[in-house]
Image (tube, grey):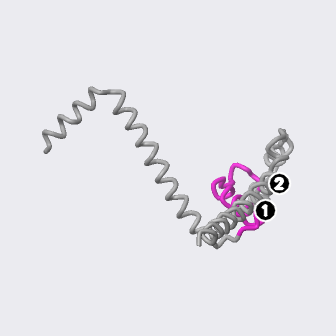
Amino acid sequence: MRESFNLGNLSRFHNKNILLRRVMRKIEKSQSVSDYFLKNDFTFCNKNVKEIWKNLSVEDQEEFCFDVSRISWNKYFEKYCLGCKQYVVNEDLSTLPQARFQMRIMKFIYYFLTWSVILGVFYACFPQLRNSYSDNLQVIL
């Protein structure tokens, strides 16, 4: 009986270990893809592009829109991250709503814990506030 219990626990640990290995492989793959760009500095000169843009007529500027200031960067980075998720890490986008929900929960927990620590430290460091708070609480009750 005890041996089967231990084997059951080992198989459960092994399955979790396989899941963690898959996650680590995905992280390593995405890191290896972006390593070159994160570790090196790049300098781009766009002086010629600016000159061409100034010399274009309004109609040509509308037709050949390459003005970077008109890019919606929030939408761009959202699509960039989705593309990385789908094509670099090879994950299905159908898990996105569940991941966003989990992210909201994690964000709530993070803010709750952060404010709890801040208020706890504030409460511990200023005893005069603690006394006035308890006095006010007694007045309310």
Please tell me which residue is depicted at 78% across the width and 54% down the height of the picture: 28
Name the disc covering residue 6, or none: none
Q: Residue under label 1, please give it.
A: 88
Asked if residue 127 lies left or right of residue 16, the reply is left
Residue 81 on the magenta span:
yes
Q: Name the amino acid type tagged 1.
A: Val
Question: Disc 2 marks which residue?
Answer: 33
Give residue 71's quadrant in the image.
bottom right
Q: Position of residue 58 (x, y in %)?
A: 74, 55
**SS for callout 2:** helix
- Check residue 125 for magenta coloring: no
Q: In the rendered view, does 41 fall on the left or right side of 6?
A: right
Res 66 → quadrant: bottom right
Tag 2 near tag 1, CB within 8 Å: yes
Q: Nearer the viewer, residue 37 or 17?
A: 17
Q: Is residue 55 left or right of residue 141?
A: right
Q: Amino acid at mark 2?
A: Val
Name the residue located 33 percent from the left edge and 27 percent from the top edge.
Answer: 126
The magenta region covers: 66-91
